[in-house]
Amino acid sequence: MTIRHTGLTRRQYLVGTSAAVAAGLGGVGLAAAATTIRQGYQTNMWGMPTYYLLKSGLLEKRGINIQEFAVPSGNLTMQQMVARQVDMGTYAGPSFIIGHDKGGLIAIAVVNNVGKTARVMARKDLGISKVEQLRGKKVANQTGSSTGNIFVDQIATGAGLKKGDYQEVRMNVNDMVAAMAAKTVDAMVCVEPYNAIAEADGLAVTLVDFYSFDKLPVFMAATPEFVEKNGDAIVSYLKAWIDVDKAFKSDPGKVADTIYSFYTSKGYKMSKDTFAKALARVEVAPGWPSDLKPYMQHHAEVLLKEKKIKAVPDWNKALRMDFFQKAMS
């Protein structure tokens, strides 16, 4: 399997293939049993429920093979999907809207909410306590990501800062803590577990988290070609997500150990206590929130105004709620 690294180091990628289909498909149809999903996900905390899904064996029990495509942030997965290098992937609303606009991507469920995991943080030594104090400062931002768009279009603007009032430094979220430590940036728009690491190391203080602006639902999306050909497999896949939700609630210790081992294997120095605080900010909730369409309409209108999309999506086509309804039956 060949992966385009998009300028990323090998250390930033986790690439592998799941075990072969386990014996006993538990009633899964032949269509699902014959399906291999190229699964993209981000290696920050937003993607860790998906990582647990891939490592739990729940998909194999339902006869689904997986190829993993891990990247630092979801907007990179979205780009891979637009290029048809990946079948499914996770990212927040703004990235999904852009992916639907550019590649017809279709959401099959919301899988978690991560508004509490995203924060604007400043170097502790600068004595900054408010977003408006970032005027003239260097701000690390994953440009093009959902957090990047929300910071620029809503949080900074709401604090009276327009583009040019601060220096945006384009950077992957997993490089930001090192940049803060080296004092090459003054602040960062980052996500867990990197925020918790910066806080525990005494490098940064929180100016604001995103939850007060946006609960940040994370979507599981698929390419339209995959949706058209693999409806039964999608239903089985979402049944496994329902099992993941149960695991997060009934056996959080096992879930935490699985995800913690991912970060320690990548060389991150993080105590279990720091990690537990970061993971606790993720809300696993597969399904469809009742207020989702107005929320997405708002983000689409912002992106349209900023000329990042050509048109507001038809939500009845972009959000396929029927698959999860079948998975629940």
Image: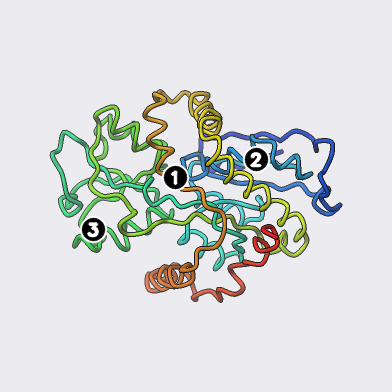
Find residue 282 and name its label.
1
Find residue 228 and name its label.
none
Q: In the figure, residue 303 lies in which quadrant?
A: bottom left
- The amino acid on which the numbered mark 2 sits, given as a three-letter code, is Glu
Frontmost of labels 3 and 1 is 1
Name the residue rendered at 37%, 35% in the picture: 277
Q: Tell me where residue 47 appears, x and y as whole percent.
A: 52, 44
Frontmost of labels 3 and 2 is 2
**Structural distance between the alpha carbons of marks 1 and 2:** 21 Å
154 left or right of 223 in image: left
Of residues 113 and 137, the one nearer the viewer is 113
In the picture shown, does residue 31 fall above or below 187? Answer: below
Find residue 164 and name its label.
3
Extreme residue in the left direction = 127
**Structural distance between the alpha carbons of marks 3 and 1:** 33 Å
Q: Tell me where residue 2 appears, x and y as whole percent.
A: 68, 39
* Mark 1 or 2, nearer chain start: 2
Q: Residues within 10 Å of mark 1 (few under 14, many from 20)?
A: many
* Mark 3 or 2, nearer chain start: 2
Frontmost of labels 1 and 2 is 1
Q: Tell me where residue 290 appears, x and y as whole percent.
A: 49, 68
**Structural distance between the alpha carbons of marks 3 and 2:** 38 Å
Name the residue rendered at 82%, 43% in the picture: 25
Q: Mark 2 points at which residue?
A: 68
- Give the secondary structure at mark 2: strand
